[in-house]
Amino acid sequence: MNEVTIVVVLHNSAAHLHAFLDALPAATEGVPAWQLVVVDNGSIDDGPAQVIARAPHAVVIRQENLGYAAGINVGIGVAEPSRAVLVVNPDVTLGPGCVAALLDEIADPGVGIAVPLVLTPERRLVWSLRREPTVLRALGEAVLGGGRAGRFPALGEVVCDPSAYRRSARADWASGCVMLISRACLEAVGAWDERYFLYSEETDFALRARDAGLALRLTPSAVATHVGGDISPRLWSMLTVNRVRLFARRHRPAHTALFWGVVTINEALRAPFGPPIHRAALGALLRPSRWGAL
């Protein structure tokens, strides 16, 4: 049995694959057996061809773009048996020994998901840990902004305390750019929810893992670099709407209405003078009948 299956979902990701593939040998050092599974969601670039040429032992699946969660589920479904699955974005460069360090973290049976310390290409720390969404946290972010609100656990979803990233710390969820998931967690939680085409699927999965009694834990000795990038108005609209959809699936309608209202106020406050993404998200929030079109 493999120790880990590495699942990567592509969508026109060719520009990042050289760095990702180059880093894999050092990143998997100390891991006796692993498998790379690449699922291509309807790319029109040469990403799949790059993988076939440079990683001939990888499993490459090509399909139409059914969404990120669907791509992950396909990758896990076709993989050989393994003790864990590493879900990783193609614009991530895994640091040396990263995978082994994450595997050590999930050796604790109470830990279902391990995540690394995430840095920007300029080596700046990314605030990757998150708290569960609440009405009060959404209000704190609307009034104070995410960075300021995140300094106070009750008022912000993003964990902005530098000391939290210097130790093995638990979080409700984390950025989904790199997540190592134990086999026990996969069996307890089940498939990733494909109703989220993009965004909130990692939040949903991590919260369901927590509901099953399995923690998400940061592993600061494991380091990954995430390129990321600018977000378009359409993608920001999808991200914002999916936050509300996720909240609705875990709370009663009246509570959800409050959350929707606060998120809408947040976007409305920033729409007149902020980037166009906020005007787009505000328009989307005010038209629930069109959420499915996103």
Image: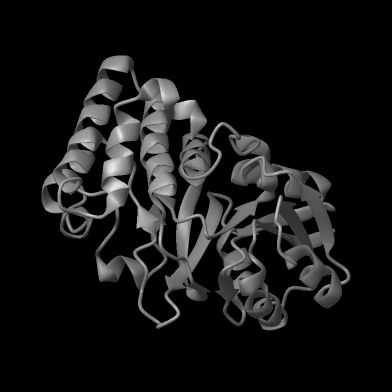
Q: Residue at x 83, y 47 (%)?
A: 78
Rendered view: 78 above or below 53 = above
Toward which corner of the image does residue 10 lie, by quadrant?
bottom right
- Nearest to the observer: residue 18 or residue 156: 18
Q: Is residue 158 left or right of residue 7?
A: left
Rendered view: 174 above or below 267 = below
- Nearest to the observer: residue 282 or residue 80: 282
Toward which corner of the image does residue 288 lie, by quadrant?
top left
Counting from the top left corner in percent of width and height, residue 72 is at: 67, 47
Q: Residue at x 34, y 64 (%)?
A: 127
Rendered view: 4 above or below 121 = above
Q: Is residue 94 left or right of residue 138?
A: right
Q: Is residue 133 visible?
A: no
The N terminus sits in image quarter: bottom right
Q: How many callouts does the rendering have?
A: 0
Counting from the top left corner in percent of width and height, residue 40 is at: 73, 54
Counting from the top left corner in percent of width and height, residue 50 is at: 78, 72
Outermost residue toward the right in this view: 57
Q: Residue at x 38, y 35 (%)?
A: 241
- Nearest to the observer: residue 88 or residue 108: 88
Q: Is residue 8 left or right of residue 225?
A: right
